[in-house]
Structure formats: C-alpha cells, structure tokens
Image (cartoon, rainbow, N blue to C red):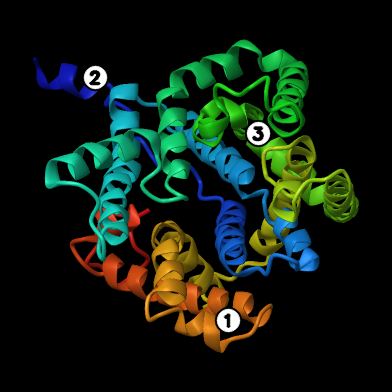
Amino acid sequence: MTESTAAATPSPPKRTKAPHLYEVDVVRILTFACVIAVHTTSHTVADDDLVLYGFFSLVHFTREVFFALTAFVLVYSYLNRPQPMKSFLPRRFLLVGVPYVVWSIIYFAASNLRSPHGTFGEMLVRLGGYILTGTAWYHLYFLLVTMQVYLLVPVILWLVRRTRVRHALLLGISLAVQLALTALYMYFPDVTSGINDFNKQLFFSYQFFIIAGAVAADHSAAFLAWVRAHRRAIGFIVLAAALCTLGVYVVNMLTGRSPYRAGTPLQPIEMLWSIAVALGFLAVGTWWADRRDPRSLVAKGLDAGSDRSFGIFLSHPLFIWLLLWVGDDWLERTVPKPWLTLVTYVLVVLLSLGITELARRSWFSLGLTGRRFSSKKSVPTR
C-alpha cells in the first residue's frame, strides 16, 4: 500500500459513549431506595398495622420501574453506540452474572451457617438449583430477569425498529396484555396455577415495562422533553394514582384478602401505579439534571450514589437478616413497632453503603458490586 493510498483510506469512526443522562441516575437511586423500603417493611411490619401495609402497597412498584429502567439503559446505550452483539452482550452479562453467582453463594452460605441442610454434595445441587431459578435469596430474581432481558436484546431492538411508526399501538397492546396477565395472577390464580410459584422470575410478567423502557429509549430526546414540559401534570397523575392504589388496597382487604396480599405487586393497579411512579421519578430527575452543578457536593454525592446503588441493592438483605435475626433478635426486642421499620431502614442503608464503599475500593468490586475496580480517585468506571 502506497503512502498516498494509506492517507486516502478513511479510518473507522471512533466509538464514543452515549451522552450520560443524569435524569436516569435519580430514577435509579430512588428506585433502589424504595426496594430497601419494601424489604425492610415486609420484615418489620406488625400483622395488624394496616397503615404501614398501605405504605407497603405504595412502594411495591420497584420491580416494574427497575425493569423499565434496565430496558431503557440497554436500548439507549446500544442506539447511541451500535456494536456487534458479541461485543455488547458479554460485558453486560459479566457485570450482572458475576455478582449474581457470587451473592447467590454468599446468601446460600448464610442460610446454612448455623444449621447446614444435607451433605456437601446435596448442598451443591441445591445451590445450583437456586442459581438457575433466582431463589438463593428473595431479591436475586431481579438479576435473573435482567439476564433474561439481556438475552432478548436482539428481539427487543428488532421489535422497536419494526414498529417504529406504530409504537403507540405496540404500547397499547402490551399494556392490555400486562393488565390481563396480572389480573389473572391476582384474582384468578387457578388459571395460572402452573406458574404462580415462580411468576416473578419470568420476564413476561413485566413485558410491558421492558417494551416501554425500550420504546422510551428510542425516543429519548422527545420523551425527556415531554417530561420536562409536563412536570406539574405528572405530579397530579402521581397523586391520583396513589389514591387509586390505596383505594384498591382497601377494597382488596374488604373482600377478604390479607393486608400483604392486598398490596401484592403483581396486580393491575400496581401496573398503573408503577407507570405513574416511573414518570414521577423521571420528572424529579429532569428537574435535577436541569440544575445540576457538577462541582457541588450534592452532584458528587448523587454520582457516587448511582455508582454504588447496585452494590447496596445486592447486600442490603444480608444486613436485614443480621439485624433482625442474629443476636437473638436483639433489635426487634429493643425497638418498638412501627419505629422498628424506620430504624432498621436507616441502619441497613448505612451498613450496605459501608460494605459497598469498601468493595468498590478493592479487587472484589466486580463480584460484590457489579462494577469493575478502578484505582482512580475520581468517579469510578461506569
């Protein structure tokens, strides 16, 4: 090749990261904060505390918002930086799959610490089953469903592109299916008896939110502009949806369901409530992004919080377990209800943040937090 030919040969375009959306950081932090609230409340609420169970129903949107956020980030990242799936997906699986296996082992070991069940070989077989089904601990199915979404990325992208001029119709059909499916789960469980024991571990239980997140990413600029222009209206939507959710919670109890069952997440009203909350969180996120000063302590704190949020999510049930059951239930016997819920929440957040902060500064970062270790003192690698 001559020098002139080499000069004329265009170099491949340099791939750049998609513009960072600080709005999404706020949604992520708020969602994970509410995940901890769900799990803390469920372990500390008194059986007859109908008010706290009402709050419980209002924070039970977290699954749906989490998977909408997952799909949004995936599609937004891919559309802004297209690359072969053989490059795009392995990195995603690494950042979720490794901590999924690591924490499954940690929680399995914790559950067998004081009273191992079976021989070592039997325990290994049982652990393998837990990893396959996302049941090593009660929150790890989030990661199992996330990996199902990763496997479906090519199909999701194809669907988004194929229906680009009919996205409203796609969302309408998907929402109708979502409401019908969750109505069966809630009110006609005999119809879905074959999957009721593991419906929360299956991606199609959240298909509308996965599709909605992907479609929103395809229209990210216009969608975020719409949210910015309608923040006040979104606030009223959230308020109305909250009142409707509480109303259905009361009706469910009056028709014979337990307070817990009345606010269960896989029911139609929670689907509508989750949509409202997602819009509300995003409205807060746009408000923040429009005013963000990268030099401020608040901005640095939120950036760090977004980076640590996944690690906090992974570790927080361990501290709920330690606080409430280790030490002969000392905390539960010392702090009266309902204050036990608040005290446990604060302690769990602080302890989870502490262990995540330590992990982020060590070579164990990937396995414990889903983030690669960075020796830099600046904001860690995303």
Q: Please tell me whether mark 2 or mark 3 is closer to you in this view.
A: 3
Q: Residue at x 64, y 37 (%)?
A: 220
Q: Residue furthest left?
A: 1
Which badge, 2 or 3, is on the more N-terminal residue?
Answer: 2
From the image, tell me which residue sits under label 2.
9
Residue 84 visible somewhere in the drawing: no
- Identity of the amino acid at label 3? Ala
- Residue 160: % across, % down: 60, 19
State the residue position of label 3.
Answer: 216
> Which is in the foreground here, disc 3 or disc 1?
1
Disc marking residue 343? 1
- Which is nearer the eye, 143 or 290? 143
Sequence-wise, the earlier of marks 3 and 1 is 3
Give the residue furthest to the bottom.
Answer: 334
Residue type beneath disc 1: Val
**Hey, which quadrant is residue 368 in on the image?**
bottom left
* Distance from the alpha carbon under mark 2 to that under mark 3: 38 Å
- Label 2 to label 1, Cα distance in Å? 65 Å
Task: Give SS at disc 2.
Answer: loop
Picture residue at 40% right of the left edge, 80% below the top: 328
Examine the image and state in which quarter residue 15 appears: top left
Quarter occupied by residue 130: top left
Look at the image and tell me whether residue 113 can be seen. Answer: yes
Please report the residue visible at 60 percent of the width from the left and 34 percent of the height from the top.
217
Of the residues shown, which amino acid type is indicated by label 2?
Thr
Residue at the spot x=52%, y=20% of the render? 157
**N-terminal-most mark, 2 or 1:** 2
Label 1 residue SS: helix
Mark 1 burial class by Cα count in 10 Å: few <14, some 14-19, many 20+? some
